């Protein structure tokens, strides 16, 4: 029988020791709740439990303020935008966070920095935009990886990096054929050289993953401790002059004569420009330009107890690289620096059902299929979080109305750990008034809406059934 030990880490700001935090609400749903809450404790993630003492922040908003720029959301994107505004443009932003700093997806993801953004492959880029634009998009993502790595280096951020690349594991023979075709496109059209691995080579040199029929290995890929990474961004942003205000949810937003009046529980913040970086936690009604533009999807994650030497040997778990499989509802997993296994995948449709044990059991079953020697291993941490998926599966860093100084960076689709650093930088450039360099589709078009957005959850249920049938049966 699987043993699950979920302990809520005590993760309070040391400089605000007298602040009473609200309880974490595991049923929060961005399509239902008006805000993500106020001053809630963190989700009980492995990252929260092992991140150490967080940096100081500037406390909640406690009165009316007049500032140049407000950034809503203190995850990877919001913190990157704030530090780049200060570093590259001399603008000291004010960051507003509803709960604790990096409370949302940033402290709940799998820590996989991949050479991607959004859900589409390079070959799908070619079909959608043509080869020329796809190549420019590839170059932009590569530049994004450099932005990400440079921030870690410049900030001397100790985020437990696990380098070496990314293993894309085919869970069926048909999926392996697709990987072979994608590798050919990457090599011939993008000069990006990957290596195809048969099952025996994968099992011998990397990991004996029982479901795998082969894999594609790509050179770019880094596993990180996401909350330690965010704390590094946090420190950098404040050292450069940005202010970060937790427990300050946006309760109202009115634009008067070009000035944005952002209402929080502690006071109204007036700003000439606003950047939205709320990811999968973007509430309906935050701003009209964002209503029904994001499809929030829940992802479940767990972390096991540390593996014994015998268990590591039984799985031949030689690699510490980030790994994903080829399911549409993909699994993402890796061996962490302390020899635990982290694995994540799909979860509930709604927040109200997120705590149903069947969703955790589906993930545990996936772990057992992939690594039979770990059947029955104790699960020390489990949690879930909302992922921001756009309706066309690609992110946007955009100004929806050129007459209003409002900007957003959203829609990573589960591939935001790396690209969020660059997206924050790009949003900072737009806020600073730079006009050039935004020719790519993710910069020059808005997040698309959807005709059936009011019925999205009904459609999601049907899609999940179809994806399961396609991935596991057909």
Image (spheres, rainbow, N blue to C red):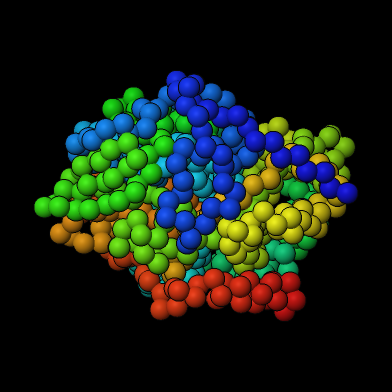
- Left or right, 406 with respect to 386, comes to left
x and y percentages locating residue 6 in the rendered image? 71, 40
- Left or right, 28 with respect to 197, comes to left
Foreground pick, 291 / 399? 291
The residue at the point 32 percent across, 54 percent down is 408
Query: From what the image shows, is residue 45 above or below residue 372?
Result: above
The residue at the point 46 percent across, 37 percent down is 39
x and y percentages locating residue 358 in the rendered image? 74, 59
x and y percentages locating residue 269 in the rendered image? 24, 40
Q: Is residue 428 visible?
A: no
Foreground pick, 61 / 79? 61
- Left or right, 55 with respect to 60, comes to right
- Residue farthest along the left direction in this orientation: 257
x and y percentages locating residue 464 in the rendered image? 63, 71
Query: From what the image shows, is residue 128 above or below residue 121?
Result: below
Q: Is residue 459 visible?
A: yes
The residue at the point 28 percent across, 45 percent down is 263
The residue at the point 72 percent across, 79 percent down is 474
Foreground pick, 129 / 6? 6
Q: Quadrant of residue 284?
A: bottom left
- Left or right, 220 with respect to 34, comes to right
Q: How many marks?
A: 0
């Amino acid at each position: 029988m699987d043993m699950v030990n979920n302990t809520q880490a005590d993760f309070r700001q040391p400089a605000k020791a007298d602040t009473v935090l609200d309880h974490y609400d595991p049923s929060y749903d961005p399509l239902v709740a008006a805000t993500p809450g106020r001053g809630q404790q963190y989700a009980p993630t492995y990252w929260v439990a092992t991140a150490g003492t967080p940096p100081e922040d500037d406390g909640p908003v406690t009165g009316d303020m007049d500032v140049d720029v407000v950034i809503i959301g203190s995850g990877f994107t919001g913190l990157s935008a704030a530090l780049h505004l200060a570093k590259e443009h001399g603008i000291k932003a004010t960051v507003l966070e509803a709960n604790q700093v990096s409370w949302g997806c940033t402290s709940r993801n799998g820590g996989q920095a991949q050479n991607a953004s959004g859900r589409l492959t390079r070959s799908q880029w070619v079909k959608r935009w043509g080869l020329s634009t796809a190549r420019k998009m590839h170059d932009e993502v590569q530049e994004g990886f450099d932005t990400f790595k440079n921030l870690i280096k410049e900030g001397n951020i100790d985020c437990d990096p696990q380098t070496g690349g990314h293993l894309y594991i085919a869970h069926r023979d048909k999926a392996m054929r697709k990987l072979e075709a994608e590798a050919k496109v990457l090599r011939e059209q993008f000069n990006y050289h990957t290596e195809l691995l048969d099952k025996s080579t994968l099992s011998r040199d990397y990991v004996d993953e029982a479901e795998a029929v082969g894999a594609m290995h790509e050179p770019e890929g880094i596993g990180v401790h996401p909350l330690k990474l965010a704390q590094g961004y946090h420190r950098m942003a404040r050292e450069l002059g940005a202010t970060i205000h937790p427990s300050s949810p946006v309760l109202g937003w009115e634009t008067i004569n070009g000035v944005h009046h952002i209402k929080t529980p502690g006071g109204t913040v007036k700003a000439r420009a606003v950047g939205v970086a709320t990811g999968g936690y973007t509430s309906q009604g935050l701003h009209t330009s964002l209503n029904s533009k994001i499809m929030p999807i829940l992802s479940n994650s767990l972390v096991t107890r540390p593996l014994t030497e015998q268990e590591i040997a039984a799985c031949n778990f030689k690699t510490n690289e980030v790994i994903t499989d080829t399911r549409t509802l993909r699994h993402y997993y890796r061996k962490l620096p302390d020899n635990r296994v982290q694995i994540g995948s799909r979860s509930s449709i709604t927040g109200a059902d997120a705590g149903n044990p069947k969703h955790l059991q589906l993930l545990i079953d996936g772990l057992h299929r992939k690594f039979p020697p770990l059947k029955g291993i104790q699960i020390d941490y489990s949690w879930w979080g909302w992922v921001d998926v756009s309706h066309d599966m690609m992110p946007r860093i955009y100004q929806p109305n050129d007459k209003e100084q409002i900007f957003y960076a959203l829609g990573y689709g589960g591939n935001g750990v790396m690209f969020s650093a660059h997206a924050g930088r790009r949003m900072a450039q737009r806020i600073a008034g730079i006009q050039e360099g935004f020719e790519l589709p993710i910069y020059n078009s808005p997040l698309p809406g959807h005709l059936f957005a009011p019925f999205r959850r009904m459609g999601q249920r049907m899609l999940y059934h179809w994806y399961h049938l396609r991935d596991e049966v057909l």
